[in-house]
């Protein structure tokens, strides 16, 4: 396998809306969409423009799949057509959806067999940046390229010159640029950090060049769709303002330090192009030893969009979440994470049977929540509708985990006993080794919902459970 490498862009890839800056209101998002999305094999130039093609699986045959864009409150009707050799589904990550459309194989629907279709039909209650991906053999199907961005527009989006998606993925390719298939299911990955790749892409390409004018304001929707890699972004010479996390608005604030996104997480940032005409600046991914330049802002050599930075507000209107946590009366349920390499887990229950670590590993399993490996008949918890649920998440392993909850957004209340400032509502939270993170939410969405690690190999090797809201 090649080292995680810097791949030079063979050509200038300009985003669709990049050429002609304008004060865009995303007024074009429809009140309803109806479309068919075919999951099928395709190819992509992951290494360099015009370079070797990689065989992928993609929605619409491409990677990422089509950007779906609707206005807040719109009805989304998507017919999934499965032309893959495996059963699949679509899960709408971060959408507080009605349960029957959540797309979880074995919990909310049967996986759609090859050659068949499934109709999703739901309303998108929250404006923001979301994504969609299969929820069947996710560890393989996402690694092969099955995912796409779902944008739900605010009725009054903040004024920007460009509204861009930066969808990042981490691929494991061999030296010929083919997907490293031999390591699918590798116990080494499953019991350690997950499937880490050696090639980083943005929007399915090795590099993105963003043409701007001095004075432009950009909204960037940044997504980490990697199987397992936590990504860290540095914006050189610019100060990004964070306006939303996981699709939910936050009080706009300058990013302190790098933008760190675990698998599944999203951030919306605003960026004022404050340099002079002709300038260049980068977005670097800095989680590795050497920073990797993955995108570049190229200022028009002479033109200026405006003399002074836009002073229009950046704040997004709040989404209709139920915020009133009643912590005094909460249903509190610990989530104890155990296992993995060097974790010292002696054994756990699987399929109702106690097994030692050796027996679990023999079944490809390595992790447990509360002493249970994978999904059981009984849920982690059952909450009456409207009840506040509080979950202390205790990472008693040597590895970070990105814990994702379906159907709800939660507040992060505490980290290692210290209260968390600000009021971000998240659907995925990174929990460091030995860390204890307390989250809470109002269980207002009836159904059967998954709670799992979004490091997809960890999920497959045991870190997945579910809870019920009645
Ligand atoms: Cu993004 Cu359960 O998934
Ligand atoms: Cu994990």
Image (cartoon, grey):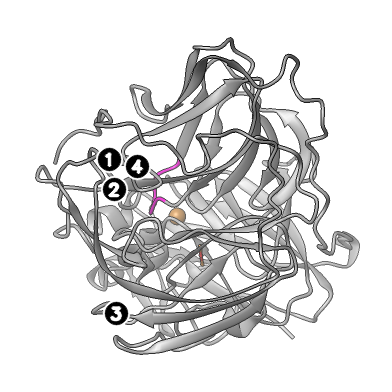
Helix, strand or loop at label 1? It is strand
Residues under numbered marks 2 and 1 in contact, where contact means CB atoms less than 8 Å apart: yes
Dot 2 alpha-carbon crowd within 10 angstroms: few under 14, some 14 to 19, many 20 or more: many
Front residue of 1/133: it is 133
- In front of the other: 420 or 370: 420
Q: Residue at x 9, y 45 (%)?
A: 176
Q: Secondary structure at mark 4?
A: strand
Which of the numbered marks, if any, corresponds to residue 199? 1
Say whether marks 1 and 4 touch (CB < 8 Å): yes
Where 312 falls versus 347 (above or below)? above
Observer-side mark, 2 or 3, equals 3
Q: CA distance from mark 2 to mark 1?
A: 5 Å
Q: Which residues are magenta?
A: 226-230
Circle on res. 201? 4
Pointers 4 and 2 in contact (C-beta within 8 Å): yes
Quadrant occupied by the C terminus? bottom right
Asked if the stretch drawn in magenta spans residue 201, the answer is no
Few, some or many residues within 10 Å of mark 4 (<14, 14–19, 20+): many
Which one is earlier in the sequence, the residue at label 4 or at label 2? 2
Residues at marks 4 and 2, CA–CA distance in whole angstroms: 8 Å
Closer to us: 26 or 151: 26
- In the image: residue 377, left or right of residue 346: right
Mark drawn on residue 131: none
Question: Looking at the picture, how far across and down is residue 288, in whole percent?
Answer: 36, 29
Give the side of residue 415 with respect to residue 158, left or right.
Answer: left
Look at the image and tell me whether residue 13 can be seen.
Answer: yes
Magenta span: predominant SS is loop
Does the beta carbon at disc 2 come under 8 Å from ligand 1?
no
């Amino acid at each position: 396998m090649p080292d995680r490498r810097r791949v030079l862009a063979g050509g200038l890839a300009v985003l669709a809306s990049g050429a002609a800056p304008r004060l865009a209101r995303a007024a074009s998002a429809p009140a309803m969409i109806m479309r068919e999305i075919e999951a099928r094999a395709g190819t992509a130039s992951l290494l360099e423009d015009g370079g070797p093609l990689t065989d992928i699986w993609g929605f619409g045959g491409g990677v990422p799949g089509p950007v779906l864009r609707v206005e807040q409150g719109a009805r989304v009707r998507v017919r999934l057509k499965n032309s893959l050799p495996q059963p699949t589904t679509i899960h709408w990550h971060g959408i507080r959806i009605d349960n029957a459309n959540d797309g979880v194989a074995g919990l909310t629907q049967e996986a759609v067999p090859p050659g068949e279709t499934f109709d999703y039909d739901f309303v998108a209650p929250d404006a923001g940046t979301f994504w969609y991906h299969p929820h069947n053999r996710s560890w393989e199907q996402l690694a092969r390229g099955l995912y796409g961005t779902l944008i739900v527009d605010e009725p009054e989006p903040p004024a920007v010159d460009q509204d861009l998606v930066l969808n990042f993925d981490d691929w494991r390719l061999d030296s010929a640029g083919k997907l490293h298939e031999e390591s699918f299911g590798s116990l080494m990955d499953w019991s350690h950090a997950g499937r880490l790749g050696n090639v980083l892409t943005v929007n399915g390409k090795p590099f993105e060049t963003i043409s701007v004018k001095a004075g432009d304001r950009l909204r960037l929707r940044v997504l980490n769709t990697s199987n397992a890699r936590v990504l860290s972004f540095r914006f050189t010479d610019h100060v990004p303002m964070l306006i939303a996390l996981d699709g939910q608005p936050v009080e706009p604030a300058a990013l302190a330090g790098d933008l760190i996104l675990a698998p599944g997480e999203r951030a919306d940032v605003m960026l004022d192009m404050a340099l002079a005409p002709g300038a260049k600046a980068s977005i670097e991914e800095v989680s590795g030893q050497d920073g990797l330049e993955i995108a570049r802002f190229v200022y028009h050599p002479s033109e200026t969009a405006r003399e002074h930075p836009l002073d229009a507000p950046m704040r997004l209107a709040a989404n209709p979440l139920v915020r009133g946590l009643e912590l005094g009366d909460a249903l509190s349920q610990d989530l104890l994470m155990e296992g993995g390499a060097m974790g010292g887990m002696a054994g756990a229950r699987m399929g109702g049977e106690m097994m030692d670590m050796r027996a679990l590993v023999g079944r490809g399993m390595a992790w447990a929540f509360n002493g249970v490996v994978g999904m059981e008949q009984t849920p982690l918890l059952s909450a009456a509708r409207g009840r506040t649920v509080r979950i202390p998440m205790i990472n008693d392993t040597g590895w970070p985990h990105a814990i994702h909850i379906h159907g709800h957004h939660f507040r992060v209340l505490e980290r290692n006993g210290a209260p968390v400032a600000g009021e971000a509502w998240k659907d995925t939270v990174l929990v460091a080794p030995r860390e204890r993170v307390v989250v809470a939410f109002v269980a207002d969405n009836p159904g059967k919902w998954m709670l799992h690690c979004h490091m997809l190999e960890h999920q497959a090797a045991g870190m997945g459970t579910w809870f019920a809201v009645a």
